[in-house]
Amino acid sequence: MEKVTCSCGHENPFGTKICGKCGRPLTEEAKSQKVLDMKYDGSAIRSKTYNKSIIDK
């Protein structure tokens, strides 16, 4: 299977639109896409929740 290499040097799987390491767009479609259209995954979703710390209790 082909790999797409980003300008940062990271090898991404074929079909990837945005670099998995630096977030730069890899395709013309991704370059023209607005930031508002992006969905967050993984830790970005978890960072939206508020966790009480010892100080907040």
Image (cartoon, rainbow, N blue to C red):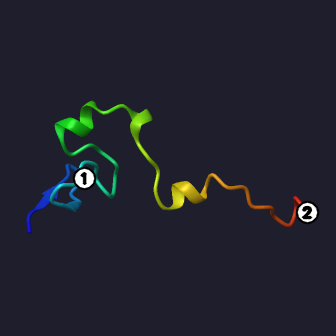
Mark 2 residue element: loop
Task: Work out whether residue 22 or residue 14 is closer to the camera in this orientation and state it.
Answer: 14
Q: Which residue type carries mark 1?
A: Cys
Taking 51 as reference, is 43 left or right? left
Q: CA distance from mark 1 to mark 2?
A: 43 Å
Above or below 44: residue 31: above
- The residue depicted at 30 percent of the width and 33 percent of the height is 33
Number of marks in the rendered image: 2
Residue 49 placement: quadrant: bottom right
* Mark nearer the N terminus (1 vs 2): 1
Q: Where does label 2 land, which residue?
A: 57
Q: Position of residue 26 (x, y in %)?
A: 21, 46
Q: Where does label 1 land, which residue?
A: 8
- The residue depicted at 46 percent of the width and 56 percent of the height is 41
Outermost residue toward the left in this view = 2
Answer few, some or many: residues within 10 Å of disc 2's Cα (few below 14, many 20 plus, some between 14 and 19).
few
Q: Position of residue 28 (x, y in %)?
A: 18, 36
Q: Position of residue 2 (x, y in %)?
A: 8, 64
Taking 41 as reference, is 16 left or right? left
Above or below 27: residue 32: above
Residue 35 placement: quadrant: top left
